[in-house]
Image (spheres, rainbow, N blue to C red):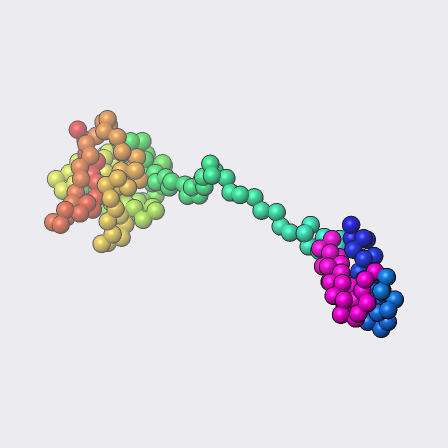
Amino acid sequence: MNNLFIVTLLISFIGLIVGLIKPSLFVRIKLPTRKLVGLVFGGLFLISLIGVGITAEPTKQNIQKETTKPVTTAPSRTAKPRPTTTPQVQEIVFDIPKLFGKSLPQLKSTIGQPTREKPNGYDAGGWAEWDKAELTLSVNYDENKKLIDTDIGCAMGILPSKLNVYWSEQKLRQAGNISGSNYPFRVILHKNKEGVLYSIDICYK
């Protein structure tokens, strides 16, 4: 189709030039004047020019642009983003159920030498403390190195190592592995005047 418009374009262009120069050549086809020649061949020329433009084949550059367009896919409506965060698990710092009931030498062989230890002045008993992961485990023992409840404290206690730092009951229980209720010892919560928990004591039943 494009070739037909090109041939018509050339014929109309030649006819327009010749008719404007010597219109008498077109008397036989009833175009005796330059005005009629201009209207007929000029109109045919314009129509052929438009037809050539419409029916022209795409160039290589245009084809390349079409083929290099990025392919986009519509997002799936059923796919949902998965959470990227994972729940944090509280580490067991001092496993109280396994430590309770042990003597002082047994505790030393299990969790190492105490950070602080002080025997009482009037007998061989005393207290000892271990610091680990910003927590302190404290114990009271008698002259036989056995853990005992005293008038001022229980056999064991767990509390934050730093002053004016408070842990929630849940975190302290998790750190001591005493989140349950069925134990061979009593769990006593100690709070300050404002009702803020500052330590957990573990006493004999």
Closer to the camera, 149 or 171? 171
Is residue 195 toward the left or the right of residue 49 in the image? Answer: left
The correct choice, above or below, for 104 with respect to 55 in the image is above
Q: Quadrant of residue 94?
A: top left
Picture coordinates of residue 174, whole percent (x, y): 30, 38
Tell me if residue 104 is in the magenta stretch: no
Picture coordinates of residue 36, whole percent (x, y): 76, 66
* Residue at image location 25% in from the left, 36% down from the top: 145
* Residue at image location 86% in from the left, 69% down from the top: 24
Is residue 62 toward the left or the right of residue 168 in the image? Answer: right
Picture coordinates of residue 125, whole percent (x, y): 21, 40
Closer to the camera, 40 or 199? 40
Q: Is residue 7 visible?
A: yes
Q: Is residue 138 visible?
A: no
* Residue at image location 23% in from the left, 29% down from the top: 181
Q: Which residues are magenta?
A: 29-55
